[in-house]
Image (spheres, rainbow, N blue to C red):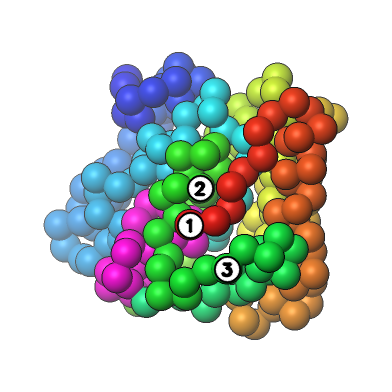
Amino acid sequence: MKIIGNDWDDVLGNEFEKDYYQEIRRFLDDAYQTKVIYPKAKDLYRALRLTSYQDTKVVIFGQDPYHEEGQATGLAFSVDKGTKVPPSLINIYKEINTELKIEFDERYGDLTKWAKEGVLLLNSVLTVEAHKANSHKDIGWKILTDKITEALDKKEGPLVFMLWGRNARDKKTLLHNEKHLILEAAHPSPLSAYNGFFGCGHFKKANEYLLANGLDPIDWSL
């Protein structure tokens, strides 16, 4: 079954035919008709479509999509142009500026450029009901994103995993490939950023690792 439209379809094999995924689809078919669900159905797999398996160099895990109107785009932490930039993304900008002296327009939150450079911006849970954070955490998405994580762990080329906060750090148990760099820190949310996200050095470390392994670094500017 071709869902993504690039090499992820082959990498994930028959995951989209399994019972747990069919249960997700049945749940969402009803939910999209009866409730307000984010992101739009067409954007469910936008992260995978923009960043193919082969092109992935850095993986940043989010928890679940933004749950307020006009925010969720299918890319973790990203919002569309013209949408107010959420506090977590503002803190990400601040950390990149501290590490790499890159200036950001804090009115602009579209991270599509990063995705096209090889940064997989993947939420652990791919949908959410409006105004109800983490409301879809138990419908089966974590099974699929665990499979994605396991597939990335098997990738031959070196990868950088940025695991921010408890939900993302839970994925570490699936990572065993010594070629990859695993970076852990607190979540960039204002509630936790001062507990270890600020000063983590992840963006500089990621680029140093990519360069050391013969890969082009990420241009973190937008």
In the image, residue 142 sits, relative to residue 71, either above or below, namely above
Contact flag, marks 2 and 1 (Cβ < 8 Å): yes
Q: Residue at left 70%, top 19%? A: 156
Contact flag, marks 1 and 3 (Cβ < 8 Å): no
Examine the image and state in which quarter residue 15 appears: top left
Name the spot of residue 21 as percent of width and height, x first: 39, 36
In depth, the one of 50 and 16 nearer the eye is 50
Q: Residue 103 shows which numbered tag?
A: 3
Q: Residue at left 47%, top 29%? A: 52
Assess whether residue 34 is covered by the magenta stretch: no
Name the spot of residue 153 as percent of width and height, x first: 69, 30
Residue 166 visible in image: no
Assess whether residue 75 is covered by the magenta stretch: yes
In the image, residue 6 sits, relative to residue 217, either above or below, namely above
Give left or right: position of 12 versus 68. Answer: right
Q: Residue 222 shows which numbered tag?
A: 1
In the image, residue 104 sits, relative to residue 180, either above or below, namely below
SS category of the residue bearing label 3:
loop
What residue does disc 2 label? 114
